[in-house]
Image (spheres, rainbow, N blue to C red):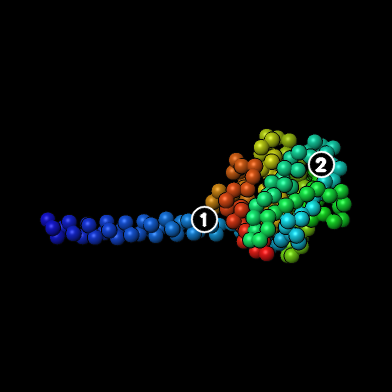
Amino acid sequence: MQLSKKPFYKSWKLLSLLLPLLSTTLLISQVDAYHLNGSRVDRPNQIKYWFDSSISQIGYTSAATHGSTAWNGVPGVNLKINATATTSASSADVKWYAASANNDLGQFYAHCEWSGGLASRSVISINTARFKNIDTDQQKETTAHEMGHALGLDHEDDVPAIMVSSGWENSVYPVQDDKDGIYHIYID
Ligand SMILES: [Zn+2]
């Protein structure tokens, strides 16, 4: 009896040692889950965004403003993200357009094209043909997601993130993994 119990006790003890290790490993992999797209804005605490007239014409000023400012306050190492509007397209880090129905964005609700590297400049296009079919919070999550691309984040499908490639995180603001990615990009 004692002999048969002893191995069981030992293996249980081993398991109890392994469990904290396993959960620690899971936590570590969650922290590092975000993916970067290789670009970053020049002055993350002085980002300028600009709206083409098509944004207000089609009634998406509020959604685009939300996305542009949804990351404000998210910390890098020594600064916080801050984006404000500009009327000067040439000085803007991020330009927003509402694509015409003829503009082929296919299945996507919106699209962000970034220039890559340091001082990246981005163009975000809203696919008006599909954007009108989602609710207000989904529109806001979409615009915040596109702004995440402009800031340097790529898609993240393994842990909760508004940078998920499809479907909804059901958050109109960045969640922890998104913020961890920003912290990694803006180390100065
Ligand atoms: Zn995306």
Q: Residue at x 54, y 51 (%)?
A: 159
Q: What element carries label 1?
A: helix
Amino acid type for the residue under numbered disc 1? Gln
| Residue at position x 66%, y 37% in the image | 137
- What is the spatial separation of the Cα atoms under label 1 and label 2, in whole angstroms? 36 Å
Say if 132 sits above or below 116 in the image. above
Q: Is residue 133 above or below residue 188?
A: above
Toward the front, the furthest residue is: 78
Quadrant housing the C terminus: bottom right
Q: Name the residue under label 1.
A: 30
How many numbered badges does the structure rendering display? 2
Residue 154 picture quarter: bottom right
Q: How crowded is mark 1: few (under 14 residues within 10 Å), some or many (20 or more)?
A: some
Tell me the tag on residue 9. none
Where residue 102 sits: x, y (%)? 81, 43
Looking at the picture, does residue 39 appear above or below residue 169? below
Residue 110 placement, left or right of 184: right
Disc 2 target residue: 55
Where is residue 73? Give x, y as percent.
67, 50
**Is there any visible trace of residue 107 in the rendered image?**
no
Q: Where is residue 142 in the image (x, y as percent from the top left)?
A: 68, 44
Q: Assign a secondary structure to mark 2.
A: helix
Farthest-out residue, left: 1
Task: Please tell me which residue lies in front, 157 or 50.
Answer: 50
Task: Look at 63% across and 50% down and name the residue there.
Answer: 163
Of the numbered discs 1 and 2, the one sitting upstream in the chain is 1
